Image (cartoon, rainbow, N blue to C red):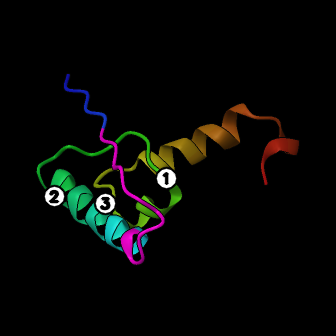
């Protein structure tokens, strides 16, 4: 197993640095995903950059949710 922790440091007081850093983040994440290093946890902004799942994991989780949890928990 390979674990990588990436941190981006920048000066928020420099005009345009926020946008530049977000662009850099998106570019690096796309490169990592294309090389099969998909993060197990990320911020809400990064969800759109993840590839579509190629399996029925979501369907399985939904079925388990309906089967295991009481009816009051199924929304």
Residue drawn at (33%, 43%) of the image: 39
Residue 49 visible in the picture: yes
Mark 3 or 1: in front is: 3
Q: In which quarter of the view is residue 21 placed?
A: bottom left
Neighbours of disc 3 within 10 Å: few (<14), some (14-19), many (20+): some
Q: CA distance from mark 1 to mark 2?
A: 17 Å
Q: Which residue is mark 3?
A: 25
Q: Which residues are magenta?
A: 6-17
- Per the image, the residue denoted by label 2 is 31
Q: Main secondary structure of the magenta part?
A: loop
| Mark nearer the N terminus (3 vs 1) | 3
Please, is residue 22 above or below residue 39 in the view?
Answer: below
The image shows residue 48, relative to residue 40, as above or below, that is: below
Residue 65 located left or right of residue 31: right
The residue that label 1 is drawn on is: 43
- Residue occupying the point 37% across, 67% down: 22
CB-based contact (under 8 Å), mark 3 and mark 1: no
- The numbered mark, 1 or 2, whose residue comes first in the sequence reads 2
Quadrant where the C terminus is found in the figure: bottom right
């Amino acid at each position: 197993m390979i674990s990588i922790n990436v941190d981006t440091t920048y000066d928020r007081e420099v005009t345009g640095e926020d946008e530049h850093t977000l662009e850099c983040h998106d570019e690096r994440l796309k490169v990592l995903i294309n090389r099969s290093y998909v993060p197990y946890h990320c911020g809400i902004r990064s969800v759109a950059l993840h590839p579509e799942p190629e399996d029925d994991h979501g369907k399985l989780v939904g079925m388990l949710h309906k089967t295991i949890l009481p009816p009051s928990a199924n929304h």
